[in-house]
Each structure stands twice: as structure tokens, then as C-alpha cells.
Image (cartoon, grey):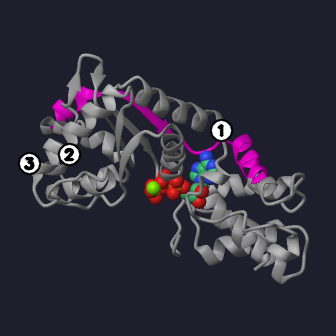
Amino acid sequence: MYNAFFGFSESPFNLSPDPGFFYRSQQHEEALANLIYGVQSRKGFIVLTGEVGTGKTTMLECLRDYLYAQRIEFAFIFNSRIKPEELYEMISYDLDLRCNRQSKTDIIYSLNDLLIQQSNDGRTTVLIVDEAHNLEWDVLEEIRMLGNFENRSGKLLQVILAGQPEFDRKLDAPNLRQLKQRVVLRCMLKPFNQFETGEYIHSRLAKVGMPEQTVFPPDVLAEVHTRSQGIPRVINALCDNLLLTAFALESPVTTIEMLDEVCNDMRLEWPGRRLRVRGGFQEETLRPSPQLSRGD
Ligand SMILES: Nc1ncnc2c1ncn2[C@@H]1O[C@H](COP(=O)(O)OP(=O)(O)OP(=O)(O)O)[C@@H](O)[C@H]1O
Ligand SMILES: [Mg+2]
């Protein structure tokens, strides 16, 4: 809506996990390098965790691009509220296994053939599961067993499990200790620091045709960081709404007043939030983490 007004080629703060907008903060760079290293060196199980909205799915999309480019076969399970039989069915569709897709036994034999053939060709095969914190115990157990395919040169199926931090805690449960023991690589995404938040916003604006951004002055950038607590999805929502407000007011720059209005509309909470009262500010009680109460 505001793209023409600001001269953007497309919306800079979309909420979709588009790898085209991937900002390589040091930790994102390291996490992606770790995922790729884990796959290349056939490590078996790799876990990627991060708070809601920190970029796990975006990172998996980047990995997916890498796997496509390397012509490495992979299955991507993005809906984790599934039963074991659905897990097998989804794997068989993604890997295009020629077998009876309703039969677990058939799928396992066919998968075994594919894994061996890929391995003979010097390639590996990957299973990616997003939202792994939602996986039921029995599905996790099936995934653990899929990790048992191996030959002398290493694991035949590389399994990447991405989820919220509670997934790490779930792995501590006594009945998952076999799976936990197999996890050889862990990556964690943390929210951006203030410098990274600024760079992240710059990089998104540069991508849509504004290399030297002038829309968000330093005081607004600093407040966007504080209020979003460095969480990319919240940063996107704030910046998108700020641009919309500026456009409505026909202003080429955003202001703290606009940010206040946007935060009120979004009912955004952040630690140390200060309420405007007559004659100044009043400190509000600390809240644990930023929450978007409107659809994010
Ligand atoms: N490094 C990054 N570069 C560019 N955009 C990013 C980055 N990290 C996150 N984002 C953006 O932040 C938003 C949320 O990212 P994403 O959906 O990947 O988070 P998530 O960790 O998978 O969230 P959830 O826990 O809800 O599944 C998306 O709009 C995405 O484009
Ligand atoms: Mg996600």
C-alpha cells in the first residue's frame, strides 16, 4: 500500500519466511553454517532452537535452497501435529518413494533403498522437521529410529529438528534420552542485539531499493529494538505498521509518537514499558517478553 509512496519495489517487512530477505547476523550465519556442516559431515541429528519469531523457519528455508542447489534429496515436515503413519506418508511423498504409501513397512524398505543409492552416489539425504516441539512422543520415537540407517561412512539420513526452546527441555525427558544422546549438533537463535536490529532494518530496506534509509531515524530505531526485544517478527510488524502510519500522514519519516500509537494498537508489551501520564511517564511493571496480541 505504501510501497509507491516510499519508492519500494516490494513490501520490506513481510511476515513470510522469505530467504531472499535473509539477514546474516553473526549468529544466523553461524547457525546456517552449522546446519550445512552437520548435513555435509553426516552427523545424524541436529537441533535448532529459538524463541518464537527468531527466524527458525527462515533459516530452514535457506537450508532448503542450499539442498536444492546441491541436489540433495530431502523431506520437509512443516506440520508437526501428525501421527506416526502420517509422518511416513509425508516422507514418502516428499522423497517420491515408489511404494505403497499407506504401508509403513513398504515405505521403510523403499527409504532404505533410496538412502543406500544416494550414499553410493556420494550424496546424503535429509529430513527436516519444523515446529518439532509439537511432535508427539510416538512420532519422536519413529524419527529416532529413522536415524538408525547408517553404513560405514556415517548416518544415511540427516535429521534436523527445529523448534521452540521447550523442545530442548522435552529432550531431557527420561523416555527421550536415546534421542537426546544422538543429537550431535545444537544451534540456538537468540534475538538481535541493538546493532543487529538496526542492520536488519537497513538490510530489508536496501533489498527493496532504499540503500541509505532515511525513514527510521536513530531514536525510532533504538525504540523499535527495545520494544521488539530484538525479535525479528515483532520488528517486522512494528516497522510495517510504522510505514503505514507515516504513509497515512504523508510523512517521509517515522516518529516516536507514531511508534507509541502503533504499539498501543498492537497492544504490545515489553519490559519497562512506560505509560504516558499527564506531565511525564509512569513506569509499568515488568513483563516477561514481547507479545503480539493481534494476529502476527
Ligand atoms: N535472519 C533473518 N533475516 C531476515 N528475516 C528474518 C530473519 N530472521 C527472522 N526473519 C523474519 O522474521 C519473521 C519470523 O521468522 P520465522 O517465521 O522464521 O520465525 P520462527 O522462529 O520460525 O517463528 P515461530 O517460532 O513462530 O515458528 C519472518 O518474517 C522472517 O522473514
Ligand atoms: Mg517457524
Query: Is label 3 in a helix, a strand or a loop?
Result: helix
Residue that badge 2 annotates: 140
Q: Neighbour class for label 1 at 10 Å: few (<14), some, many (≥20)?
A: some
**Magenta-drawn stretch contains 241:** no
Q: Judge whether residue 279 can be spotted in this image.
A: no
Q: Are marks 2 and 1 in contact (CB under 8 Å)?
A: no
Q: Where 213 sits versus 110, above or below?
A: below
Identify the residue position indicated by label 1 in the image.
25
Main SS, magenta residues: helix
> Residue shown at 51%/50% (left/top)?
61
As shown in the figure, which amino acid type bears the numbered disc 2? Leu
23 horizontally vs 182: left or right: right
Asked if the magenta segment contains residue 192, the reply would be yes
In the structure shown, which secondary structural element does the residue marked by tag 2 occupy?
A: helix
Instruction: Find residue 265 and report its horizontal and vertical position in percent.
Output: 63, 78
Some atom of ligand 1 lies within 8 Å of the CB belonging to the residue at label 1: yes
Q: Earlier in the sequence, mark 2 or mark 1?
A: 1
Q: Is residue 258 left or right of residue 271?
A: right
Per the image, the residue denoted by label 3 is 105
- Identify the disc placed on residue 227: none
Quadrant for the N terminus, please: bottom right
Q: Disc 3 vs disc 1: which is toward the camera? A: 3
Residue 69 seen: yes
- Identity of the amino acid at label 3? Thr
Estimate the spatial distance between the alpha carbons at disc 2 and disc 1, rounded to whole Å: 31 Å
Where 169 sits versus 257, above or below?
above
